[in-house]
Amino acid sequence: MLTEQGAKTVKKIKTLQVIQSEVENTNTIALSVDCIIFGFDEAKLKVLLIRSDLKKYAGKWSLLGDLVFPNEDLDGAAYRILKQRTGLSDVFLEQVNTFGTVNRHPAGRVVTVAYCSLINIQHHKLNILDNELHWHDVKNVTDLAFDHQEIFDKCLQQLQKRVQEHPLGFNLLPQKFSLRDLQNLYEAILDIKMDRRNFRKKFFAMDFLVDLNEMEQNVHHRPGKLYKFDYKKYDKKQKRWVGIYF
Amino acid sequence: MLTEQGAKTVKKIKTLQVIQSEVENTNTIALSVDCIIFGFDEAKLKVLLIRSDLKKYAGKWSLLGDLVFPNEDLDGAAYRILKQRTGLSDVFLEQVNTFGTVNRHPAGRVVTVAYCSLINIQHHKLNILDNELHWHDVKNVTDLAFDHQEIFDKCLQQLQKRVQEHPLGFNLLPQKFSLRDLQNLYEAILDIKMDRRNFRKKFFAMDFLVDLNEMEQNVHHRPGKLYKFDYKKYDKKQKRWVGIYF
DNA sequence: CCATAATGTGTTTAATTTACGCATTAAACT
DNA sequence: AGTTTAATGCGTAAATTAAACACATTATGG
């Protein structure tokens, strides 16, 4: 908690800023948000990056981010920034972690809150306002600007964990999908191979897939059945995990 | 990422502060850290709270927190604040989540990063510099000051999850402990009852417990064997979870 | 029409979790 | 001192879940 004394310190620091901010800008803390947007295409997991326009990191790629406004909620800032940079709305953003090393940003002290999302590239058309915005295969993401590699790594790790515990993955698929689509998705995100038949059994046992009695169209092999995910049924289930797993 | 334009905004905002901070302090963002310290005593999970000294929240309890210094890492701030308020060092703090609703703090815009820890109350003597600092049974924690109830709830939830995936719990026990101690711990944190014999089997199967060939002393029942946790062996194991569990 | 490759549907086996049974040991009580 | 009580320690059987693998079916493409 912030004590009465602490509350006074807020003012004190700001008073200090009044004096020092004219000289240099290292005596206060700016707050930013970075959005890590994962997408799925060609059976590969991708991430949305933008080319850094800071000279120090010329040519390097970086995450989508910007400063939080003083009168704006943290979550609100994340949605605004995503919308501004990509045109994307109607996307669920989840806070992952906050990065606050003193010298992480060359422009001064900037603490950043990382938000992560998972979208269907086909179904969310990007408004590419900035033509330096590109989807990158997550396997080829290295050497990002700032500490963005660290942020990216953490988000990917978190994504891999989340996708095993919650049905996030369905955001990456079209409304109607085949079991092969679903398996490709999990294999791409988790970077593993799974047994097709056991995978199938697993999902049918969960009983959240609805058979649409439709088949795939225009595929170069025997068409598979199409399914959709039953979110209502899932929300009701609410099974609690208890045990010790390490 | 923070663009070149964004970097300029950092300065712009600070210039604004120069003007406005003299009038009111709502036009910049202050950053604080809150420490949620969990402990274990009398087979109950406890949390360290301090009485709020803000008039608005007179009589309510709140978390340990304070502002982050401009030249201090986020993690560093958490350790410093914990040390200052409790005398505790040599404690592992883990970041849980950042809370940034605009009006969460009456003193102005304060975004706070929550850090969580788990300690053995017996083995970490508190330097109670502030006599309004107390251990509370987590079951009786309600109606905290600010948005601290929300922060606390999130941390407890995270703790319950973490303790099932990592051997954090051993921090709460003495070096030498009985299986009953261990089970009490898990039952308290997870708020469930477990079968004594299966619990035992589970842990022996993991093979991280070292039999010390000693017995409990001064207990009012048949003494149990004492064990310690083999962290080295655990670190080597590094088993990766893959699968779908929802 | 045949080879190919993917889908759809099992079965069998192993591993893990769950639910108990029961002897042993020490403390507390009569 | 013997008996009751309550906890520890060890073990087994059933149920559930996960892993490994066999094979028929269906569409594509030559």
Image (cartoon, coloured by chain):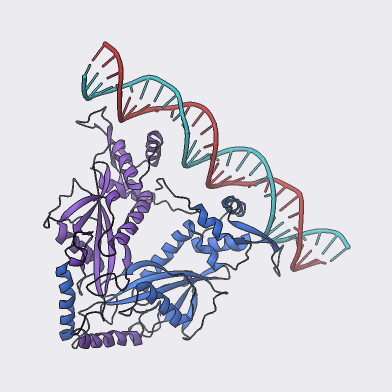
Chain colours: A purple, B blue, C red, D cyan
In which image quadrant can residue A58 be found?
Answer: bottom left
- Nearer-the-camera pick, B111 or B232: B232
Seen at 40% across and 39% down, the residue is: A202
Q: Residue at x 15, y 73 (%)?
A: B8
Q: Quadrant of the N terminus of chain A?
A: bottom left
Image location of residue B64, percent across then percent down: 41, 78
Q: Position of residue B175 (x, y in %)?
A: 60, 67
Compared to residue B177, the image places residue A229 above or below, namely: above
| Residue A106 on image: x %, y % | 24, 71
In the rendered image, residue A117, in percent from the top left (x then y), is placed at: 26, 55
The number of numbered badges drawn on the structure is 0
Residue displayed at 34% across by 71% down: B113
Residue B143 visible in the displayed image: no
* B175 shown above or below B30: above
Q: Is residue B65 left or right of residue D6?
A: left
Residue A120 seen in render: yes
**Quadrant hosting residue A96:** bottom left
**Viewer-proximal residue, A3 or C6?**
C6
- Tell me: A56 left or right of B149: left
